[in-house]
Image (cartoon, rainbow, N blue to C red):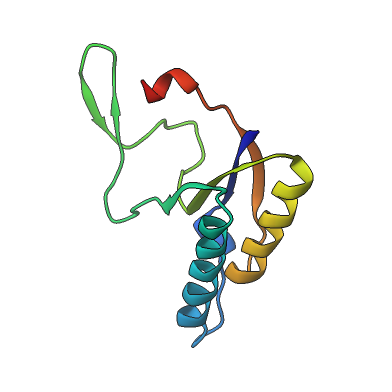
Amino acid sequence: MAKYLISFPSAAMVVPKGELEAVGHDAHAVIEEAKAAGVYVFGGGIDEGVPPVLVAADGAVAEGGYPWAPTLDGGFTVLELPSRVEAVAWAARLAKACRCDQELRVFGFDPRSLA
């Protein structure tokens, strides 16, 4: 089975006033369904209140991330699924719950990272 990264940038999530609580409830319900199905690996979002730093190989630290790269923000979920078809179905459930499109990618998981 492959691991799939389902994500969205913060700017994609435009929620009408008064619906944010419902979005949170619906999104958490999908995550609970994924956990119950045994396909949930992990999820969360970038804490946009903490600015990134760029750490060089020599340990030097510079404020901000890569200046040439798009901002990394938003929410992320990793699910382990038997097929891309199932991954698309879960991404659609999350898109409906979050009220925004979700990007789907195969997550390049390194099994040696568990040791």
**In the image, what residue occupies the spot 56% across and 63% down?**
33
Quadrant of the image occupied by residue 11: bottom right
Closer-to-camera residue (2/92) = 2
Q: Is residue 62 left or right of residue 70?
A: left
Q: How many marks?
A: 0
Which one is nearer the viewer's eye here, 67 or 75?
75
Residue 51, position as x, y percentages in the image:
29, 46
66 to the left or right of 104: left
Determine the residue located farthest toward the bottom in the rendered image: 18
Q: Residue visible at 23% across and 11% down? A: 58
The answer to whether residue 2 is above or below residue 49 is above
Q: Residue furthest top?
A: 58
Reply above or below: 51 against 56. Answer: below
The C terminus lies in quadrant: top left
| Residue at 64 percent of width and 33 percent of height | 2
Q: Return the residue nearer the eye: 66 or 13.
A: 13
From the viewer's perspective, tell me whether residue 63 is left or right of residue 37.
left
Q: Is residue 69 left or right of residue 94?
A: left
Q: Position of residue 56 (x, y in %)?
A: 29, 18
In the current view of this chain or complex, which residue is farthest to the right?
85
Q: Position of residue 19 (x, y in %)?
A: 52, 84
Where does residue 1 sit, x and y in percent of width and height?
65, 33
Q: Residue at x 65, y 38 (%)?
A: 105
